[in-house]
Every structure is written in structure tokens, then in C-alpha cells.
Amino acid sequence: MDVDPASLRIVRYPDPVLRRRAEAVDPADESVRAVARRMVELMHEADGVGLAAPQVGLPWRLFVTNAGEADPIDRVFVNPVLTLTSPAGEPSPLEIMEEGCLSLPGIHADVRRPRHAAIEAVDLEGDPVSMAAEGFLARVWQHEFDHLEGVLIIDRMGPKDRMVNRRSIKDLELSFEA
């Protein structure tokens, strides 16, 4: 995979890469490792808590997080699998929280998501990662995982938020076309 990490920037809606289902990558590939390091830099520069590879124009199953107080460590998740159940293995209760997205600047919406999530992935050393969380951290994983599936917060917002953000969404579409 020939990618210049220094050239990576956060892409904005409606860039078509944001709607593609991402493909698995090899964590041992040095370009994947270099891209992940650059993504961590971009996430911090943008004051984000997560960033998925499609958000930098790459249809790869990879995302990075640093969820502040909820998990203040830079983490890389390669080829993640997400499970949305409670610790008892039952369907997780849903909760609503406001979300924003680095690829949709200026747009915020109340999004209903399961409170609990578990994730399995591989890190950049090729070691398996297995974690479970609830609340904000579980939400961050779900948001970034959505990017790997081509799903955006505008797909998850209700009619009220869709109406409130209508102009901002249209402005992003017009600026992309220009």
C-alpha cells in the first residue's frame, strides 16, 4: 500500500470514501503503521477523540482513539469487531448523547446508541486487543466503527436534528462540489 502519511488530511462530507465499507488491512504493513501514527496526530490537531481511516480518505478497517478522561491513551484498532451487548451478554440499553464528527464540522446531533460495547481488534504490534466499555468510550468506538461501515451521524439523527442541521449539511455539499 503506497500512501504518503504526511499528505493525509481529514476529508469532509460528502466525500464518497465516507460512504464506502472499509476493507481489512495488514497491521504488519509499515504503511499501515505510518498511517495510524499520522491519524493520531490529526486527531489531536483537530481536538477529536477518534478518527477512522475513511476520514483521511482511506477505505481501511482502522481507527484511532483517545477518549480523554474515559480512556486517555492513544489507541489503534486494526480490523475491529464490535459487539453491542451488556456485560451480562444481554442487549445493551440505549442512551442518547450529542455527537459531532470531524468530517462534518459544525454539525451536532443527538444520537441513540447502546450504552455498552466490546471490541476486539489487533494493535500495531500485531497483538490482539480485547476491551469492553460503557458510556462515552463505548460511544466513541461505535461512532468510529460506523465510519468503517460507511455510516455517518447524519444517518443516525432524528427529524428534529436533521432540520436543525439542514443548512450546514447543504453548505458542506455545495463546498464539496465547488
Image (cartoon, rainbow, N blue to C red):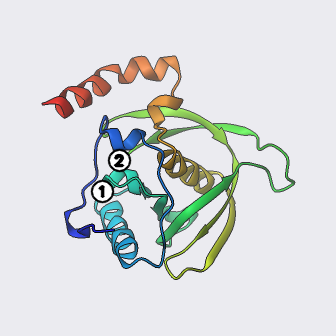
- Residue drawn 39% across the image and 71% down it: 32
- At a point 69% along the width and 46% down the height, the residue shown is 115
- The type of residue carrying mark 1 is Ala
- In depth, the one of 10 and 111 nearer the eye is 10
Q: Is residue 104 left or right of residue 62?
A: left
Residue in view at x 39 percent, y 51 percent:
54
Q: Is residue 155 left or right of residue 43?
A: right
Query: For the view shown, which residue lies furthest in the left direction?
Result: 178
Residue 45 is situated, as x and y percent measured from the top left of the image, at 28, 62
Give the vertical position of 13 relative to 137 (above or below): above
Q: What is the spatial separation of the Cα atoms under label 1 and label 2, in whole angstroms?
A: 7 Å
Give the position of the C terminus as an image quadrant.
Answer: top left
Question: Does label 1 or label 2 sit earlier along the sequence?
Answer: 1
Please tell me in which quadrant of the rendered image residue 50 appears. bottom left
Residue at the disc numbered 1: 46
Residue positioned most to the front: 1
- Is 130 positioned to the left or the right of 146 in the image? right
Do the residues bearing badges 1 and 2 touch, measured as CB atoms within 8 Å?
Answer: yes
Name the residue tied to disc 2: 102
Q: Secondary structure at mark 2?
A: loop
Residue 156, percent across and down?
53, 31
